[in-house]
Amino acid sequence: MPVVIRPAVSADAAALAAVAAATFPLACPPHTSDEAKADFIAKNLTEISFAGYLADAERALFLAELNGQPVGYTMLVFGEPHDGDVAAAITLRPTVELSKVYVLPGHHGAGVSSALMDASLDEARARGAIGVWLGVNEENARANRFYEKTGFARVGTKKFLVGERWEDDFVRERSL
């Protein structure tokens, strides 16, 4: 059965939080402590957090399901970036941040990320964006290869706080 990509709704908050808790640690560099990962998840990726994201008109979330089970998600954040390094690096406006692209490990390489990316880029276009940007840890080789393959060029760097440590992220951008 093919993967189904659909807009996430408020009833999906728990499923999104479960996928987020399982996948966020995979995006962290090897030196990130388990405590720092758990702290980030507890502060940003809970069911309550996702309920807020889903209620925010400036966000769009997509859920990937296989046989009715959640296997991945994306989140878009519309509007001008608040991070000064990002604002200086990106060149396309209006823009949207592709804040999250996460797929459960058993589904990597099966086209789920590409399907989520397509749905997210279609939504960005539909809302009038001409560019999409994202931040990705510079040590996350798998994600960086995927983003390069899907047309995201490295345009700058930014910092990302996990626990008490600032990590180095590439800022990537692509046109729509």
Image: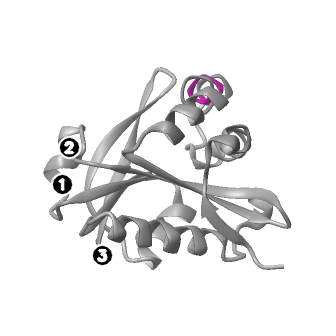
Q: Which residues are magenta?
A: 37-41
Could you tell me the amino acid type at mark 1?
A: Ala
Could you tell me the amino acid type at mark 2?
A: Asp
Magenta stretch encompasses residue 12? no
Q: Badge 2 local density, few (<14 within 10 Å), some, or many (20+)?
A: some
Residue under circle 1? Answer: 89
Could you tell me the amino acid type at mark 3?
A: Leu
**Residue occupying the point 51% across, 70% down:** 119
Residue under circle 3? Answer: 176
**Residue occupying the point 57% across, 74% down:** 114
**Residue occupying the point 59% across, 74% down:** 115
Q: Nearer the viewer, residue 152 or 112?
A: 112
Q: Is residue 81 visible?
A: yes
Q: Which mark is residue 85?
A: 2
The answer to which of marks 3 and 2 sits earlier in the sequence is 2
Q: Are marks 1 and 2 in contact (CB under 8 Å)?
A: yes
4 sits to left or right of 28:
right
